[in-house]
Image (cartoon, coloured by chain):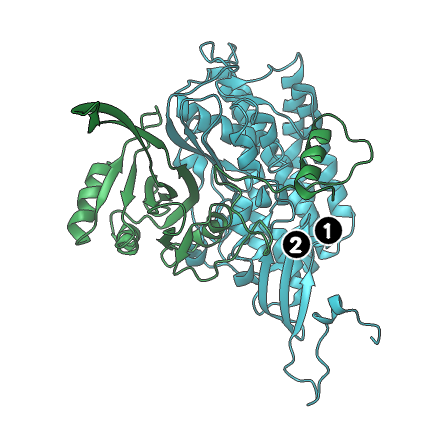
Chain colours: A green, B cyan
Amino acid sequence: MNLETIKSEIEANVPGCRLEIVPNNSPSGQHSLLIDSETALTVARFLRDAAHLRFDYCSNVTGIDWPGKEISEKVKIKKILDGVEQEVEEIQKTQSAGHLEAVYHLYSMEKKHGPVILRMRTEDRADRIHLPSLTPIWRSAEFQEREIFDLYGIVFDGHPDLRRILMWDGFEDHPMRRDYVEPDDYEYEPTPHDAVLQKAKQHLSETGGR
Amino acid sequence: MSATTAATAHFTPKPSTDGGEGQLLEVSMGPQHPSTHGVFRMDVALDGERVVKLKPVFGYLHRNHEKIAETETYLGSMPYTDRLDYLCSITNNWAYALAVEKLAGIQVPERAEYLRVITGELTRLQNHTSVIGFLLQDMGASGTPLMYAFREREKVLDLFESLTGSRMMCNYMRFGGCRADMPAGWLQQAQKVVEAFPRFLDEFERLLSGNEILMARTQGVGVLSKELAVDAGITGPMLRGSGVNYDIRKVDKYGIYERFSFKVPLGEHGDVYDRYMVRLLEMRESVKILQQAMRDVPPGPIMDAKTKLRGFRPKAGEAYGRIESPKGELGFYLISDGSPNPYRYRVRPPSLVNLTVLEDMCLGQNVADIVVILGSIDFILGEVDR
């Protein structure tokens, strides 16, 4: 089933939705559909319930981390050099916020077609990390969304039981993020050497010999 | 119970002041419980013998497989996939190889496709036999059925050993084919094992299927409705035990599965007995596939000549590849950014998703039935926690 037709059908049936096809250049040809978080539940419900689509089976739910990139732009700035106003080209560096992404692979058990791939993106990676949960539509998303919350830190609004699943409750960071730094879990060793010795030295210098 | 420590006090029932009726007992089953097949815990609330709440607790075996794979090359992750579902390393290899092949557009030679089907279906045979053995063991049939199952599993593992060099961690497939061709005489040996397999299944069925205790313990126990199974994304024999006709070998026709004639056994009631029966019948279909594949296997290369395993850099893009593993839909989702290691590597574990309906199947059942229902799910913690 063509993603273009699915997209135009959703646009005809869900008013106000903003969809975008994310092209995939690999030979697999699995293009995906970027949906906005306001109408995500309505779009998902349409995909599940429309009689000829019937995407009743949400197979795979996963998160992806896209950290912010440094964007360098050449900007022309007017500057006063030696008392004369001149136009100088300067490279201005800005940091993009980056985003977290949740990906849903949908199939139909009734019609035996698929996949249709849905994506949702958060606004940034720091505090605007809320996305609507699709668990009310497909229950199979429940534990997998919990896993994304645990490992990537996306907060799914409307999830029935959003807790950590693989890491323990007291754990604080999100280990699947690209910029995750593992904690200094230093263990005393009587004869440290090589990498262990380096780690011991660094730990002891940071903690003051403890 | 005078010397109750602080840790155990939480699970001790509160002393009743009003005769004790209606008090719930909280039991923490696991993580070191023999029926959980690994380190897995359930927080169970009991009203007498009846289960009123059950919350699964995961993560004891978590090692962040996905993160490790993202720092590894594409080839370097292949042996690590063996450790996901450590009973079925070959189908894990297959799912991963399929995803990479989709990502990079690799064609697999004819003979390798046959080798994949043969080893994959042998994996299904040995997985289903051991699962049935363990299920009976969990039910209290201590030893005997499991020994019968393991006797047959040994024969398949011997075949794997002489083909791949390892009994369980086979590391057999590569993207673009398979790692090793059949040694001399292997096919005849495998044919012998497969020809003898239906006799073992007859024997197993004679011993078990009509057994009164087995029927009493499994029929009507742990019923999973069709609607819930689809909604919760259940796959594999569990889904088909509930009567949903969905087998990825038939739906996706990945590899060369459209060449073989086989049926998809379906259950009717969705209880533990149906799941048991579906697995038994599925083994008979696997034998049929194996017979056809072994008859037709062509000569030729087993690796795609154009694929470079070392220094492998697929173009930027993404792919989701999935197969019907013995446990259900095993999928790998890969994103490449053009570098030698995947930007994103995700395993879609059938075991984890199949476990999510555990509470629904156990509510209202007796505490002893939890063990049976859990055994009928067929999960491996290496894959659940990753």
Residue B283 lies left or right of residue B134; in this view the side is left
Please state which of residues B216 and A108 is positioned toward the viewer in this rendering: A108
| Image-based side of B212 in relation to B343, left or right | right
Give the quarter of the image for residue A106: top left
Image coordinates for residue A48, horizontal then vertical, percent = 31, 52
Give x and y (percent) for residue A83: 18, 25
Q: Position of residue B367 (x, y in %)?
A: 66, 66
Amino acid at circle 2: Gly
Task: Please give the label number shown on residue B210.
Answer: 2
Q: Which secondary structure, mark 1?
A: helix
- Direction bottom: furthest residue: B18
SS of the residue at dot 2? loop
| Residue in the foreground of this view, choosing between B344 and B90 | B344
Is residue A181 at all visible to an observer of this figure? Answer: yes
Q: Report the chain holding disc 2.
A: B
Q: Residue at horizontal 65%, vertical 40%?
A: A206
Displayed quadrant of residue B24: bottom right
Q: Looking at the rendered structure, which numbered label has been put on residue B137?
A: 1
Tell me the crowding category of disc 2: few under 14, some 14 to 19, or many 20 or more residues within 10 angstroms, Cα based.
few
Give, as a three-letter code, the residue at label 1.
Gln
Q: Is residue A11 left or right of residue B376?
A: left
Closest to the observer: A58 or B289? Answer: A58
The answer to whether B343 is drawn above or below residue A51 in the figure is above
Quadrant the N terminus of chain B occupies: bottom right
Residue A113 visible here: no
